[in-house]
């Protein structure tokens, strides 16, 4: 158990809908990363927050957004969902946002029908 | 940009034999390198990392990795494979500055009883 929690584990929804994925980092970790894992794109970085502030953006679509709250949990919002958004979404946390080890949550499997 | 490559999609090894999962890197400056493992329907688990110092890094579950600067490689090794080592293995490198991970495409390891 990495100490990073993600909810829900599974999400099935329809095209055009909006969903929210939630992540709680390990106790004391200030940095949260979101990654997407799909068969065709592999593991790709989406966005990083550090102590409530956005620090880096990767291949994140404009339909996707995220935030980190004062208690350091993070939410990833996916809107106007398309079939191609079906993937595993992972959250990871690290202590300081430097090259510290990132610990991953179990992931949320999103299926868009 | 920092990048890693895993040249093998799949590696098969007999139980009890030594295993090697290959990774090569392309980075600017001193490399930080990571190995993660993903078991079916699970998140990524941290195995080990190289920051600086000894070229042989020891990690979890009896795994080790050898950093070779002249060959720009960071191969994952284990002296005696177990069936339970069968999983997907990812090599990763953090980006400069923001430290989000760039992953290789993954190598599926199958240990045959």
Image (cartoon, helix red, strand yellow):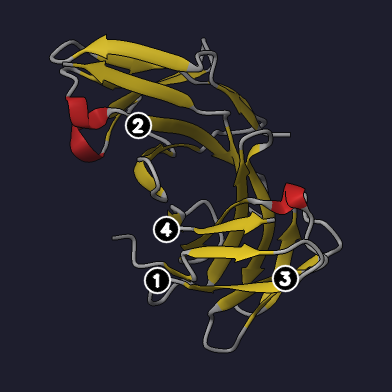
Q: Are marks 3 and 1 on the same chain?
A: yes
- Left or right: B57, with A30 as reference point: left
Pointer 3 with pointer 1, Cβ within 8 A: no
Q: Secondary structure at mark 3?
A: strand
Pick whichever of labels 4 and 1 is earlier in the sequence: 1
Rendered-image quadrant of the N terminus of chain A: bottom left
Q: Which disc is residue A106 wearing?
A: 4
Q: Which disc is residue B87 wearing?
A: 2
Give the chain of mark 3: A
Give the chain of mark 4: A
Residue beneath disc 1: A26
Q: Residue at point 52% right, 51% down?
A: A99
- Left or right: A82, with A72 as reference point: right
Q: Kindly report which numbered mark, 1 or 2, lies closer to the viewer in this rendering.
A: 2
- Mark 3–mark 4 Cα distance, whole angstroms, equals 23 Å
Q: Are marks 4 and 1 on the same chain?
A: yes
Q: Which disc is residue A54 wearing?
A: 3
Q: Secondary structure at mark 1?
A: loop
Could you say which quadrant of the image residue B24 lies in?
Answer: top right
Q: Are marks 3 and 2 on the same chain?
A: no
- Mark 1–mark 2 Cα distance, whole angstroms, equals 25 Å
In-front residue for pair A52/A41? A41
Q: Kindly report which numbered mark, 3 or 4, lies closer to the viewer in this rendering.
A: 4
Q: Kindly report which numbered mark, 3 or 2, lies closer to the viewer in this rendering.
A: 2
Q: Are marks 4 and 2 on the same chain?
A: no
Q: Residue at point 66% right, 51% down?
A: A86
In-front residue for pair B93/B106? B106
- Mark 3–mark 2 Cα distance, whole angstroms, equals 33 Å
């Amino acid at each position: 158990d990495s100490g990073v929690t993600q909810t829900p584990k599974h999400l099935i929804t329809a095209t055009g809908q909006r969903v929210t994925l939630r992540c709680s980092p390990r106790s004391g970790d200030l940095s949260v990363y979101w990654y997407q894992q799909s068969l065709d794109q592999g593991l790709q970085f989406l966005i990083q927050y550090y102590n409530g502030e956005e620090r880096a953006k990767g291949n994140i679509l404009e339909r996707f957004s995220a935030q980190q709250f004062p208690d350091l949990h993070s939410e990833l919002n996916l809107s106007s969902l398309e079939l191609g958004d079906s993937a595993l979404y992972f959250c990871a946390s690290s202590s300081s946002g430097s090259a510290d080890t990132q610990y991953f949550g179990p992931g949320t499997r999103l299926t868009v029908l | 940009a920092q990048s890693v490559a895993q040249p093998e999609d799949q590696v098969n090894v007999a139980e009890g034999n030594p295993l090697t999962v290959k990774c090569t890197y392309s980075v600017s400056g001193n490399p930080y390198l990571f190995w993660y493992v993903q078991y079916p329907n699970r998140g990524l688990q941290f195995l080990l990392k190289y920051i600086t110092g000894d070229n042989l890094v020891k990690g979890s579950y009896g795994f080790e990795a050898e950093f070779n600067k002249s060959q720009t490689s960071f191969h994952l090794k284990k002296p005696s494979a177990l069936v339970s080592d069968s999983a997907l293995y990812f090599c990763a490198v953090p980006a400069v500055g923001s430290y989000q991970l760039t992953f290789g495409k993954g190598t599926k390891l199958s240990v045959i009883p």
